[in-house]
Amino acid sequence: MSASADASDLAAEQQPEEGCTPRHVAIIMDGNGRWAAARGLPRTEGHRRGADVIRRIVRRSIEIGVEILTVFSFSSENWSRPATEVSYLLGLLRRFVRTDLANLHKNGVRVRVIGAREGLASDIRALLEEAEHLTCDNTKLTLVVAFNYGGRQELVAAAQKLAEDAAAGRLDPKSIDCDTISERLYTFDIPDPDLIIRTSGEQRLSNFLLWQAAYSEFYFETALWPDYDEEAFDRALAAFAKRDRRFGRVSSQAAT
């Protein structure tokens, strides 16, 4: 068999099976700092390269029919990083809205931002609102940007809303169930992720989508985020296509 045939077979194996593409993929984009440090570069260069990867994965998601792509861009804990790094990350967000938003809009991408907005600078809040407003009617792909986001903080905020409604007599505490909690999360109108990918070899959620990940499939990639590419993304989706998702029930294979 020729080398070109081998490459073709490998590429075919890495393609998700038809009809098995996950509707919602979430990504913990980890490893920008380590990538930069390994090359003697400032951490900000890792973040810049990482932003380029997001653009490629958005394009690939559209090509293969992923409906929702969620990226963990800035956690509520990231404010504790050095001020220069935080400033650079906020600058990346500003450049994203100024330079990438028009292209995303042209390609039918809807932008949603999840996370706490209280306490954010007014210009940052305005940018987030601009991105959501401009793209709100697009249907090709929903790009969910988790910014100033923390899973525990999201659950605390939901609990506070429930407590306020109960105290005001708008809600019977005995009626609280999974649906009433989900309705008060940032993701109230977004289906839970089918697949969560984390790069850099780390195997933890790091306070990301704690409630929503209850029945997600996980795929851990060793590559650092700036080295991630479409081929690695396809590998993750091909692995997902082979998973037997049971949601607490008996295996579909065992039931037949």
Image (cartoon, rainbow, N blue to C red):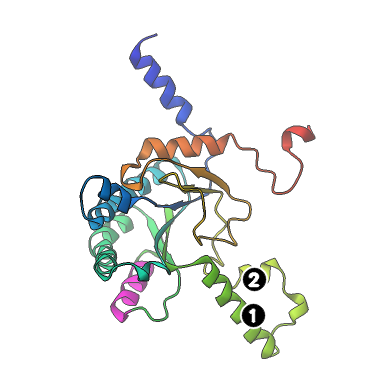
Locate residue 176: give its quadrant: bottom right
Q: Position of residue 182 (x, y in %)?
A: 62, 67
Residue drawn 58% across the image and 71% down it: 155
Note whether residue 133 is visible: no
41 up-or-down from 76: above or below: above
Going by the picture, which residue comes out furthest to the bottom?
Answer: 168
Residue drawn 37% across the image and 54% down it: 108
Residue type indicated by callout 2 = Ile
Name the image quarter holding the C terminus: top right
Contact (Cβ within 8 Å) of mark 2 with mark 1: yes
Q: Is residue 3 left or right of residue 162?
A: left
The span picked out in magenta is 121-132
**Closer to us: 204 or 97:** 204
Q: Position of residue 76 (x, y in %)?
A: 43, 69
Locate residue 8: give its quadrant: top left
Residue type indicated by callout 1 = Leu
Q: Which residue is mark 1?
A: 162
Locate residue 5: give its quadrant: top left
Local secondary structure at mark 2: helix
**Closer to us: 109 or 160:** 160
Q: Position of residue 183 (x, y in %)?
A: 61, 70
- Magenta stretch mostly in which secondary structure? helix
Name the image quarter holding the N terminus: top left
Q: Is residue 185 left or right of residue 36?
A: right
Query: What distance separates the C-alpha of mark 2 from that of mark 1?
Result: 8 Å
